Amino acid sequence: MFTDIHTHAFHPKIARHAVEHLNEAYQLDCVGEGTIADLLLREKRSGIGRCVVLCAATTPGQVVPANDYAVTLQREHPEVTAFGTLHPGYEAWESQLERLKAAGIRGLKLHPDFQHFWLDDPRLLPMFEAAQDDFIFLFHIGDSVPPEKNPSCPYKLAALLDRFPRLRCIAGHLGGYHQWEHSLKALVGRDVWLD
């Protein structure tokens, strides 16, 4: 059975808007409606039996609703492994970790570019310390701006791995969307998965 490790499905209330935002941000023409029903239908047609659905809160106020959705997805769809989310501006993050762990969620998605923080934000450090043994992190890494201006470049991830050697993480987009040369320099030989 194949597993699709990097998918997105949005709550029906925001799915259309989220797809439009992705199309605009990345100059794409996303195929699909952005809903879980559409995603699972497409995965089945492609011969994929399981998918990881990544949820991310673009603001601190979206942490609880995003995690509510992740818990619901995983509970209602046996073919889904859902990742919850955190945000450095959300103060009750410890209770969210406990809640997600109790619900069987074992992954967290962070997308610094869309969540409007930098991967080296000091507010994240206690979160990584607390979560590193119970959760796998999937980070969006890279973008079209140079690494020094990028919230989520491969070098920031490398520094994070130096600081937290037990941190289990997946570096999205082969470790550096539009920054693959930097990904090779910063991440080769490190204990990190790439998607």
Image (cartoon, rainbow, N blue to C red):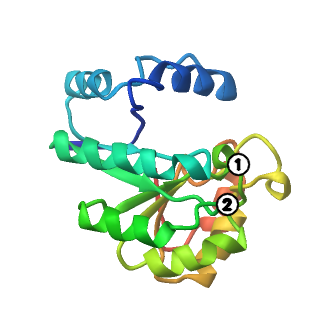
In percent of width and height, residue 76 lies at: 18, 40
Q: Relative to 42, say whether 158 is above or below.
A: below
Q: Which amino acid does label 2 sit on?
A: Pro
Q: Which amino acid does label 1 sit on?
A: Gln
Left or right: where does residue 31 sit relative to residue 186? left
In percent of width and height, residue 150 lies at: 78, 52
Which label sits on residue 91? none
Left or right: where does residue 108 sit relative to residue 110? left
- What secondary structure is marked by label 1? loop
Give me the residue at 70% from left, 66% from top: 156
Give me the residue at 76% from left, 40% from top: 144
Which quarter of the figure has residue 1? top left
Give me the residue at 33% from left, 64% from top: 99
Q: Relative to 188, say whether 43 is above or below.
A: above
Of callouts 2 and 1, the N-terminal one = 2
Left or right: where does residue 156 sit relative to residue 103? right
Label 2 sits on residue: 154
Q: How crowded is mark 2: few (under 14 residues within 10 Å), some or many (20 or more)?
A: many
In percent of width and height, residue 25 lies at: 68, 28
Q: Do the residues labelled 2 and 1 touch (CB within 8 Å)?
A: yes
Query: Which is more toward the observer, 147 or 65?
Result: 65
Q: Relative to 130, say whether 73 is above or below.
A: above
In percent of width and height, residue 72 lies at: 26, 44
Which quarter of the figure has residue 73? top left
- What secondary structure is marked by label 2? helix
Task: Compute the Cα span from label 2 to label 1.
Answer: 8 Å
Q: Residues within 10 Å of mark 1 (few under 14, many from 20)?
A: many
Label 1 sits on residue: 179
